[in-house]
Image (cartoon, grey):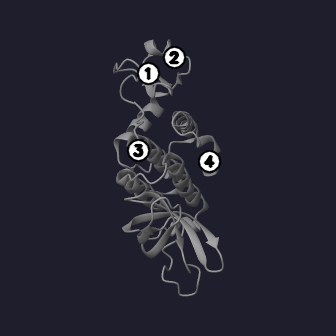
Amino acid sequence: MAICKTEAIVTKSLKLGETSKIVWLYTKDFGKVKVVAKAARAPKNRFGSSLELFTHSAVVFYKKDRRDLQLLSQSDALRHFRAFEADVAKFAFASAVIELLDSMVMGEEPNPGLFQLVLDALARLEACPRSALRTVFWSFELHAADLLGYRPELWKCARCGKEGELPRFAPLKGGLICRACSAKDSDSFEVSPEARDFLRKLQAAPVSESAFDAAGPRLEAEIDRIVEVFLQYHVDRLPGLKSLRLVRNLK
């Protein structure tokens, strides 16, 4: 049995017995980990508020190979995202970040870059005005895809590599394509210059510096379609994500 120390983001929890909890963590050094927090619901418990949803905490747990449920020894909150408790829209987008993360990541494979991306996305969602929530979420989706190895090609033709005018998006090819290549790809669809430029802007800037620009109803619908269709080719569970469906329809 190994003693493991790391940072974690609380993604889910369930009651266990009279006073305990089962807690799902996304950790910096061990990927997804499920722990039992004994007496976490008891008065004056040693974990305090560190196991609340979305909380960024420093944790210590005992890890035993071939065991699905590990034992949490210590947890100290590093940051709470209190704005999500008071704003239903921000809560919905934060939940979508967590649910999309869970669908993208399998098992205990660590990805420190993705861990930091999730923290940056939650912090940006907490800070931004309601009108920019969707913009920050798109930024998270694009950068998460990049870190997991399927960066959408927005700067040159995803089929032939040609730069210049790229008027259509081909999900199967993984990005924008030129007019000549679109004749060979029946699944491609037209993309406006405004949507193309907006997506490029999001891809070029880190989530922590993502613009607080509102896209407007027509452009929102177009970018939602591009990002969702692209991710459907890479995330098997995407159509079943409840929070993702909610934020797509949130006004």
Other residues around mark 1 within 10 Å, as few (<14) / some (14–19) / many (≥20): many
**Which residue is drawn at the image coordinates 51% and 53% (left, top)?**
97
Question: Which residue is more in the foreground, 149 or 212?
Answer: 149
The span from disc 1 to disc 4 (Cα, nearest Å) is 29 Å
Which residue is label 2 attached to? 185
- Tell me whether the residue at label 1 lies in contact with that at label 4, contact meaning CB atoms closer than 8 angstroms: no
CA gap, disc 1 and disc 3: 20 Å
At label 2, the amino acid type is Asp
**Residue matched to label 1:** 177
| Mark before the other along the chain sequence, 2 or 1 | 1
Q: Amino acid at mark 4?
A: Leu
Disc 1 is placed on an element classified as strand
Marker disc for residue 109: none
Q: Secondary structure at mark 3?
A: helix
**Can you tell which of label 3 and label 4 is closer to the viewer?**
4
- Mark 2, residues whose alpha carbon is within 10 Å: few (<14), some, or many (≥20)? some
Q: Which residue is mark 4?
A: 241
Which residue type does callout 3 highlight? His
The N terminus - image quarter: bottom left
SS category of the residue bearing label 4: loop
Instruction: Specify which label sits upstream in the sequence, 3 or 4.
Output: 3
State the CA–CA distance, disc 2 to disc 1.
Answer: 9 Å
245 to the left or right of 53: right
Mark 3, residue position: 143
